Image: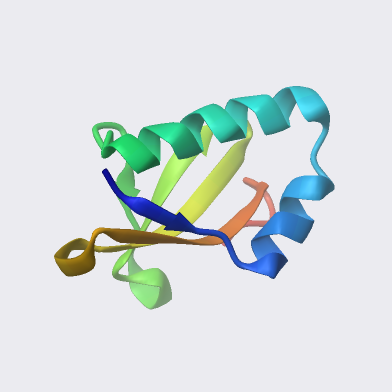
Amino acid sequence: MFKIIVPKAALKELEKIDTQNQKLIFEKIKDLKTGDFSTDKALKGRHKGKFRKRVGNYRIVYLKENDILVITLIRIAHRKEIY
C-alpha cells in the first residue's frame, strides 16, 4: 500500500477536467495506491525518474519513492499539455 501525495497544483488541474474523466482518473489513482504499475511507462529526458499512467486522453505523471512507499503526483493534464 502506497501513500499518495497530491500537491495543490495537481488538484487545480484535476478540477478543470470534466467529471466523467475525473472518475476515471480517481480509479487510476486508486491503482497507484494499491501498487498496480503494470501498464505505467518510465519517462525519459528531462523527466527521467518519473512515470506516467494513461487515462484515456489524460496522463498522470508521478514520482515513486520506493524506500518509503510514497507516490507524489506531479501533473494531471491532457496528453497535449503534459510534457
Whether residue 73 sits left or right of residue 11 in the image: it is left
**Would you place residue 20 above or below residue 37 in this image?**
above
Task: Tell me which residue sits at (73%, 48%) in the image.
Answer: 14
Residue 56: quadrant of the picture: top right
Q: How is the image coloured?
A: rainbow
Q: Residue 20 in the image: x percent, y percent?
A: 75, 22
Residue 58: quadrant of the picture: top right
Q: How many marks?
A: 0
Q: Residue furthest top?
A: 20
The front one of 81 and 27 is 27
**Would you place residue 9 above or below residue 56 in this image?**
below
Q: Residue furthest left?
A: 67
Residue 59: quadrant of the picture: top right
Whether residue 1 sits left or right of residue 58 in the image: it is left
**Would you place residue 51 above or below residue 78 in this image?**
below
Q: Residue 35 in the image: x percent, y percent?
A: 26, 39
Task: Tell me which residue sits at (15%, 67%) in the image.
Answer: 67
Whether residue 27 sits left or right of residue 24 in the image: it is left
Task: Tell me which residue sits at (79%, 40%) in the image.
Answer: 17
The front one of 58 and 70 is 70
- Tell me the quadrant of the picture where the N terminus can be found: top left
- Tell me the quadrant of the picture where the C terminus can be found: bottom right
Q: Residue 16 in the image: x percent, y percent?
A: 84, 47
